[in-house]
Image (cartoon, rainbow, N blue to C red):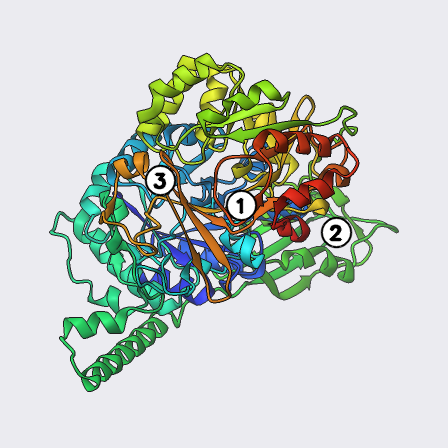
Amino acid sequence: MRNQFELLAPGGDIESIKAAIAAGADAIYCGLDNFNARNRATNLTFDNLSGVVRLAHEHNCKIFLTLNIIILESEIPAIIRLLNKLVNTKIDGVIVQDIGLFYILKEHFKDLDVHASTQANTHNDGQIFFLNKLTASRVNLSRELNIKEIKHLAQVGHENNVLMEVFVHGSYCIGFSGLCYISSVKNGNSGNRGRCSQPCRDKYQTTEAGKDYPLNLKDNSAYSNLEELADAGVYSLKVEGRIKKSHYVYTVVDNWRKQIDNFCDGNELLTDTTELYTVFNRDFSNSYLVGDINKNMFIDNPRDHAVKHFSKVYNCTTEESVNKVKKKLYDDKTDIISTVADKIKDFSIDKLALNVVVSAEAHRPLRVSVTTPSQSFDVYSESNLIHSDKYTIENDGLEKWLNSLNNAEYYIDSLAIENNETGLFVPFKELTAIKEQIFFNLNGDKARIAPIDAPKVKKLPKLQDKPSLSVLISSKQDIDLCASTTADIYYQLPDSLHHELPRLVDLFTENEQLIPWFPSILIGENYTAAVEFLEQVQPKLVVTNNTGIAYAAYEKGIDWIAGPYLNITNSFSLLCMKEEFNCVGSFVSNEINKKQIKPIARPDSFKLFYSIYHPILLMTSRQCLFHQTVGCKKKAFDAKCLRKCKKSASIINLKEASFVLDKQKGDHNSLYSEHNFLNTEIPSDLEGTFSSFFIDLRDIKTQTNVEEDKASLIQMFQNLIEGGEGAELALGQVIYPTTNAQYKKGL
């Protein structure tokens, strides 16, 4: 009955995990108190992880552990220590975002099943191939995809032994996951580090369209789309909500359990959503899934919609009738809380008691008898005990020797020593063998895996050559800059590459000095067109912010550079891209500071890049950002909007921080910080580290004033990286106001 789908539930704390188990979840994703993308959740400690896993497994439920943040170089030893412990637990898999962590798992922890997080933002074939090469057994697809796009990727996954996982219930993000920096830039709390403060849910100054919460989307619910998901070949149906309470988790999982079982039994889909509306919701939409990206996906209130929903259902017209709805909702939620408490009252994650009896008698093997609540066994030394006057086993020594059986899963409740003659000897290696056999038996006949030392990437000498300059443009009119500079000129390709392919092939054929710059988002036919572009143009070098194009370039033998939006923060990501995909260089993340950049080691014959000037992209959205701000005549965002719309606006939050909305022809909607990033300090701060510094001269209209033409700016930046006297001051006088707060703060 349950073979069609896996129902994957959130577990933000122990009570929610128990609630999900009671409601019939097939699997639960949860995090520890570090290295996971929901720091606001209560999360687990390592000490209670084993108990959670045991409880789940007793109910035929799996546990997947979230390690889904980007990893800093300084954290590599800590993540290795954690993985050394995790490989000796019974967890069913780990969920990962960081490319370097994928590499570490592939090279050193092959026993752990690896899943790609939603933070990897997977939406095209090449990304599936990329993640598959890094041994991901399943991928959580981007929430913005429609059922046709999901079906195609699921087919690609099936052909490559990669399962597809799709969010079917819970919060929608307005921006593509893993590409959102709004919380990082504005509040210093990076969503890529599990600290998102959700500024997209904030109240803003009322917009021209009369909205106070212009970035706030309704919640996702595919409750009525099970048949389409089954036809698409989706394996795992994922419920969002690791910061939700246990009664929410129970209600949503219970309703989805009934819906799935009903469907798998061949019955009509359930249509009653009363219980789903009873617990927290912002109203529901399935518009991304059905491919109708419309203005009704927004709701001008980020708080619980339940009262408003039922007030409408019951046609409430008076304050008294609304209060009755509130009272009923309170009572209903109280009943749910009581139901959950009753169902989980006997669920225990306590450590299991061990009763140990040691028998030490001359001319017989040393015997250790172990009894747990579920099993009993004896372990013997290989040789008989003999009398000796040194290195003998005494009672204190035996207790100390067995003390390591007290771990995250077990504790010694009683230890008895029988027939313990004094002055007896057994080789130390046999004591070690006994202990390992005990661990083997307690671990389900699975041998303990020895820990590894934290691997290191050799730090190469500083570069002696002066760094070069690279420049990003996106306008045909700016190509003339190539003639006036020795800087590398990158030309941004649009998100809607499909419709522009012939023109762009001609453009790059006529201007061979241009280096293609691929965007982060390439969905469906636009990804196919990007691959076709590579085949037709055969560029010698590309820069890509999309791992799908990285894989395509690798397959075609084209040199590629990892762009800034791959957000690289550690040496192992660099090593992975070079060794696994023949990458020749990479940008280092603009989210990290001098101290965090300095220990990153570049591989041999590999270039490091850093952006010293750019408009700060806060997020990219598949939704239209103008519906709720300045208004738009069209009710839905479609392919024509993507290709043809060009518009800009701004919104201001109640802290008087301004955000720039920008829509370029051929690109998705984007949100930018009001001031551009300018870091004139890093060339001298980290001299000898970077092969090239980068400036973004695209025409993104922020509130930063630029009082020189582009050719002059290029020369001024060239002067800066060459150590020219007064270069910093000169740039500050012609580009203002700017910020380098991310470089100062870091992660």
Question: Is 439 placed above or below 583 here?
Answer: below
In three-dimensional space, the C-alpha distance between marks 1 and 3, rounded to whole angstroms, equals 19 Å
Q: Which of labels 1 and 3 is toward the front? A: 3
- Residue at coordinates 16% horizontally, 78% vertically from top-left? 316
What SS does tag 3 mark?
loop
* Front-most of residues 702 and 284: 702
In three-dimensional space, the C-alpha distance between marks 2 and 3, rounded to whole angstroms, equals 89 Å
Graded by Cα atoms within 10 Å as few (under 14), some (14 to 19) or many (20 or more), the crowding at tag 1 reads many
Q: Are marks 1 and 2 in contact (CB under 8 Å)?
A: no
87 left or right of 129 in image: right
Graded by Cα atoms within 10 Å as few (under 14), some (14 to 19) or many (20 or more), the crowding at tag 2 reads some
Q: Position of residue 51 (x, y in %)?
A: 50, 60
Q: Which mark is residue 616?
A: 1
User: Which residue bears the numbered disc 2?
Assistant: 362
Q: Earlier in the sequence, mark 2 or mark 3?
A: 2
> Tag 3: residue type?
Lys
- Residue at coordinates 58% horizontally, 63% vertically from top-left? 355
As drawn, which residue projects farthest toward the left?
268
Q: Which mark is residue 190?
A: none
Q: Which mark is residue 646?
A: 3
* Front-most of residues 17 and 548: 548
Q: Earlier in the sequence, mark 1 or mark 2?
A: 2
> Tag 2: residue type?
Ala
49 left or right of 533 in image: right
Q: Earlier in the sequence, mark 1 or mark 3?
A: 1
What SS does tag 1 mark?
loop
Q: Which of labels 1 and 2 is toward the front? A: 1
In three-dimensional space, the C-alpha distance between marks 1 and 2, rounded to whole angstroms, equals 76 Å
